[in-house]
Amino acid sequence: MWSKRLALTLTAVTLTAACGGGSATTSSPGGFTPPKLSALKALGAGEGQVNLVAWAGYAEDGTNDKTVDWVHPFEKATGCKVNTKIAGTSDEMVTLMKTGQYDAVSASGDATLRLIAGGTVAPVNTALVPNYADIFPGLKLQPWNSVNGVAYGIPHGRGANLLMWRTDKVTTAPDSWGAVFDANSPYKGKVTAYDSPIYIADAALYLMSAQPALGIKNPYALDRKQFDASVALLKTQNKNIGEYWSDYTKEVQSFKSGNSVIGTTWQVIANLAQGEKAPVQVVLPKEGATGWSDTWMVAAKAQHPTCAYKWLDWIVSPKVNAQVAEWFGEAPANAKACQETADKNFCTTFHATDETYFSKVRYWTTPIAQCLDGRKDVKCVDYSEWTKAWTAIKG
C-alpha cells in the first residue's frame, strides 16, 4: 500500500506536537500531578456516534481507497457513526480537543502530557478495552501514555526516527548521528532534518554520548545548560541544512531527486523511496534514536463515551490494527496484528516484535518544567521554550 499512500494528497502527517519521550521504561514523569479525573466505570448503551480527532490514515472509510475501510465495518458492528476531524499537527490536535467537541484523539507523545495536564483527557479503564490485553508490554504504562501508573490511553502503533542516506553520494555507510551534526559536513546543503521543536531531542540524544560531561540522561529532560548546548548544535547544523521536512511524501521526492542525500527519516519513507528507485539505505545509529508512539485517548467530557471506548477496542483489534499499520506505515501495537498483515514480512520490516530494537528508541514525550528524568533540584526547559527556540534555530 506504500505506493498508493505516496499518491494520496494527505496533508503532512506531522507529529510536531507529539508527546513521545523518555526511554522505553515504565517510570512516570517526576513531579507531574494531573487533575483528578475518573475513568469510565462501565459501558452503557451506544450513543449512536463518536467524534474523533485523528492523524490522516488512522480512520479510513474508503474515501482514499475503496479497499481500505475499517470505519464502516465498525459502524455496522456497533451502531456508532464515526465523525472524523483530520489534524495536521499535534498542536492542532490539542487545540481541537480543548473545544470539548470531540470524544477521542490519536495523540502523539508530544501532545499527550499536555492533554493530561490540562484535564482535557481522562484516565482510561483498560478493563473496558478487551484487546488491550494483547498490546505489546513495551508500550503499556509508559511516560507518554500514563502518569504514576495510571493509563491515560490505548497504544496504537510506534516507529523510530532513522538515519537515511543516498548510497551513491554517501559511499561510507554512517552508523552515527554525527553524520548529520558534523559542522564540516561534506554534504552541506544536502542535509535534511525533521521540522519540529521536538527535533531538539535528536540533538540532545546525540550529545548524551558526544558530550557526556553535559550529563544528559533523558533527551526530553533538559536543564538550561543542556538545552542551550542542544540548541547551539542545531544552529550549527542549520548551516548545512538544505531543507527541513514534515510532509514525508516531500522527503521521498527530495531523496529521489538528490536534493537531500542524508538526514533523519521514518522506515515508511525509506520503503517508499526505495520503491521509487532512489538508492537509499537506513540505519538505527549506535546512539539509538528518538521515535514516536501514538495513543488513543478519551476526552474528559466526552459526549459519547461508550462509542469512544468501542472505537478504542476496535482500532487495536488484531485485524484492524494490522490494516492501520500497513496503510500508515508503522509497527502495530497489538502483538496479534502481525498474524493479520497482508505482507507477511511487514512486522519484520517494521521491527514490531523486536523489543531489543525498540529499547534503543527514546519515544517523543512533552518536555515539562518538572524534569522527566526524576531530578528535583533543577528545573527543565518546557515545551513552550522548545517552540520558541526552534524558530530561532531555523532563522
Image (cartoon, rainbow, N blue to C red):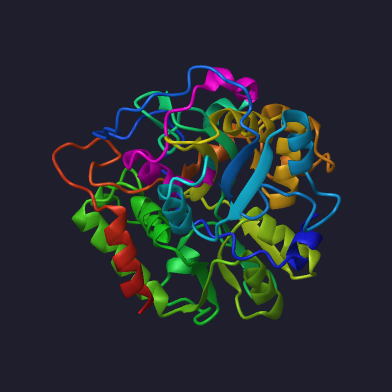
Q: Quadrant of the C terminus?
A: bottom left
Q: x, y (%) of residue 307?
A: 61, 31
Q: Residue at x 58, y 49 (%)?
A: 54
Q: x, y (%) of residue 284?
A: 57, 51
Q: Which residues are magenta?
A: 105-134
In the displayed structure, 28 sits above or below 273; it is above
Q: How many marks?
A: 0
- Is residue 19 visible in this depiction of the protein? no
Q: Residue at x 37, y 51 (%)?
A: 209
Given residues 338 and 324, the one toward you in this image is 324
Please tell me whether residue 113 belongs to the stretch shown in magenta: yes
Q: x, y (%) of residue 196?
A: 44, 63
Examine the image and state in which quarter residue 353 appears: top right
Examine the image and state in which quarter residue 338 appears: top right
Please tell me whether residue 15 belongs to the stretch shown in magenta: no
- Is residue 272 visible in this depiction of the protein? yes
Q: x, y (%) of residue 359?
A: 51, 36
Q: Quadrant of the N terminus?
A: bottom right
